[in-house]
Image (cartoon, rainbow, N blue to C red):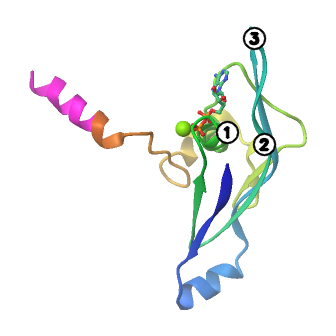
Amino acid sequence: MSIDARTEVDGPAAAVAKTAGNLLEVDNLRVWFETPRGLVRAVDGVDLTLRRQETLGIVGESGSGKSVLSRAIMKILAPNARVLPGSHIRLNDVDLASVSPKQNRHLWGVDLAMVFQDPMTSLTRCSRWASS
Ligand SMILES: Nc1ncnc2c1ncn2[C@@H]1O[C@H](COP(=O)(O)OP(=O)(O)O)[C@@H](O)[C@H]1O
Ligand SMILES: [Mg+2]
């Protein structure tokens, strides 16, 4: 997995935003899964920083951990996931580990959102079901 394809929005707003701290910081994130066939080290020491006005692309082959990383940030991991001690995710300087599930739900759709894979296909399917 490569966390690299970074673009910045230029202009005065971006210049101000850059001085206002990071939007998202991930430090040494490790998410492992316990499975009957052993431990899966899906995300094993990921660091990233996203400043305001930035767009960050995460690229990697299938199974390299992109979805697990995104789900860890959203706190919607599968029950067999373990976020290892020493992993830190900060959104607007708030450590997400200290945020309650109720507070976390208030972040969804406001500060954090996830568009799942193939959204257009899903919507097409949903509308077909709705009209039948
Ligand atoms: N609930 C789970 N239990 C066990 N392994 C899982 C679970 N979810 C994901 N994995 C494994 O974690 C790894 C990363 O998966 P994923 O983040 O979905 O990859 P990507 O999104 O980059 O294609 C894969 O090896 C996948 O099989
Ligand atoms: Mg994926």
Distance Cα–Cα, label 1 vs label 3: 22 Å
In the drawing, does residue 112 fall left or right of residue 34?
A: left
The residue closer to the viewer here, 9 or 45, is 45
Q: Secondary structure at mark 3?
A: loop
Q: Amino acid at mark 2?
A: Ser
Amino acid identity at mark 1: Ala
Residue 95, placed above or below residue 125: below
Q: Position of residue 58 (x, y in %)?
A: 60, 54
Mark 1: C-beta under 8 Å from nearest atom of ligand 1: no
Q: Residue at x 85, y 34 (%)?
A: 84
Q: Nearer the viewer, mark 3 or mark 2?
A: 3
Report the residue marked by disc 1. 72
Which quadrant holds residue 5? bottom right
| Residue hosting label 3 | 37
Q: Disc 3 or 2, which lies upstream in sequence?
A: 3
Residue 11 location in percent, x, y?
A: 52, 90
The part of the chain drawn in magenta is: 123-132
